[in-house]
Image: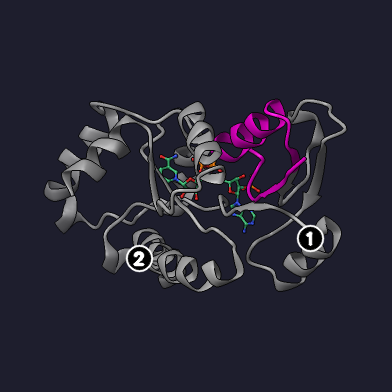
C-alpha cells in the first residue's frame, strides 16, 4: 500500500484530495496547522499530523513523525489578490506561485536521477472554496483607488466565472499525477485551468 502526505488538509482541495486517496486505498498522512481528525473519515489508513509549512521546526517534526512516504502533495497556501504595489512582500501570491512552477520544473529534473517523480497540479478558480473567504482580511486595502477601473471588471468576472474548479476536480487530477508514469510535468485541474493551459 502506498503512502501520501498532503499539506493543508483542513479545507477544500487538500481535504478532498485526502478523502480521494483514502477512498482509493492509499495510506494518507493528512497534515494541518491545527489537527482536526473528525473532518476526515475514520480509517486505519489515516494519520493526521500537525504541520505549519512556514516553520522549520514543524516541518522537521512532521517529517520525523511521518516516516517514509511515496508521494507528497504541497497543497497548503494562502490567497491574496491585489495590486502589486499595495501588497506586502511576504504575500505576493502570483509571484510565489510562479516561483513554485519554476522550482518544481527544476526539482523534477534533479530528482529524476533518484527515481522520484515531481508533478505540478495547477487548479483553476474554486469560488466555493474557503480560499477566497480565508484571504479576505489579507486582501483588504490591496486595490488602491487608481487601480479601481482596472480591477472592477476582473472582480466582476470572478463573480460570474465562465467555468470553475471543484474540490473533486483537483483530487482526481492529484490522483492522476501521483500515478502518472509518462513524464508529464503539468496537470491543469478543472475546466477553467484546462482552457487556460490550452490557450497558452
Ligand atoms: N481555490 C482556488 O481558487 C485556487 C486556485 C488555484 C490554486 N489554488 C491553490 O490550491 C491550494 C489549496 O487552496 P484551497 O482552495 O483548498 O484553499 P483553502 O481552503 O484556504 O486551503 C488552504 C489550506 O492551506 C493551509 N495553510 C495555509 N497556510 C498554512 C501553513 N503556513 N502551514 C500549513 N498549512 C497552511 C490552510 O490551513 P488553515 O486552515 O490552518 O489556514 C488550508 O488547509 C493553495 O495552494 C492555493 O493556492 C486554489
Label 1 and label 2: CA atoms lie apart by: 27 Å
Mark 1 or 2: in front is: 1
Q: Position of residue 197 (x, y in %)?
A: 25, 45
Q: Label 2 near label 1: C-beta < 8 Å? A: no
- Local packing at callout 2 (Cα closer than 10 Å; few below 14, some 14-19, many 20+) is few
Q: Position of residue 156 (x, y in %)?
A: 21, 33
Residue beneath disc 1: 62
* Residue 105 included in the magenta stretch of the image: no
- Residue positioned 74% across, 30% down in the render: 40
Q: To which quarter of the image does residue 83 belong?
A: bottom left
Residue beneath disc 2: 95
Q: Is residue 109 shown left or right of residue 155?
A: right
Q: How many marks?
A: 2
- Residue positioned 38% across, 68% down in the render: 102
Taking 124 as reference, is 86 above or below it? below
The residue nearer to you, when weighing 152 against 164, is 164
- Residue positioned 45% across, 70% down in the render: 109
- Local packing at callout 1 (Cα closer than 10 Å; few below 14, some 14-19, many 20+) is some
Taking 110 as reference, is 126 above or below it? above
* Residue 13 included in the magenta stretch of the image: yes
Q: Is residue 192 shown left or right of residue 32?
A: left
Outermost left residue: 149
Q: Is label 1 in a helix, a strand or a loop?
A: helix
Q: Is label 2 in a helix, a strand or a loop?
A: helix
- Residue positioned 69% across, 25% down in the render: 23
- Ligand 1 under 8 Å from disc 2 Cβ: no
Q: To which quarter of the image does residue 84 belong?
A: bottom left
Quadrant where the N terminus sits is top right
- What stretch of residues is rendered in magenta? 1-28
Amino acid at each position: 500500500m502506498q503512502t501520501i502526505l498532503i499539506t493543508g488538509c483542513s479545507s477544500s482541495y487538500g481535504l478532498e484530495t485526502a478523502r480521494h486517496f483514502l477512498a482509493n486505498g492509499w495510506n494518507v498522512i493528512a497534515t494541518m496547522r491545527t489537527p482536526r481528525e473528525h473532518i476526515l473519515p475514520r480509517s486505519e489508513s489515516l494519520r493526521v499530523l500537525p504541520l505549519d509549512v512556514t516553520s522549520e521546526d514543524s516541518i522537521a517534526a512532521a517529517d520525523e513523525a511521518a516516516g517514509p512516504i511515496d508521494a507528497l502533495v504541497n497543497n497548503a497556501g494562502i490567497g491574496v489578490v491585489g495590486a502589486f504595489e499595495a501588497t506586502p512582500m511576504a504575500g505576493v501570491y502570483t509571484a510565489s506561485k510562479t516561483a513554485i512552477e519554476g522550482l518544481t520544473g527544476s526539482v523534477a529534473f534533479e530528482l529524476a536521477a533518484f527515481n522520484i517523480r515531481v508533478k505540478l497540479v495547477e487548479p483553476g478558480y474554486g469560488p466555493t472554496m474557503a480560499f477566497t473567504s480565508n484571504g479576505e482580511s489579507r486582501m483588504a486595502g490591496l486595490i488602491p483607488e487608481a487601480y479601481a477601473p482596472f480591477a472592477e471588471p476582473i472582480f466582476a468576472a470572478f463573480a460570474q466565472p465562465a467555468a470553475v474548479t471543484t474540490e473533486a476536480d483537483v483530487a482526481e487530477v492529484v490522483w492522476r499525477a501521483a500515478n502518472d508514469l509518462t513524464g508529464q510535468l503539468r496537470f491543469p485541474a478543472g475546466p477553467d485551468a484546462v482552457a487556460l493551459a490550452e490557450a497558452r
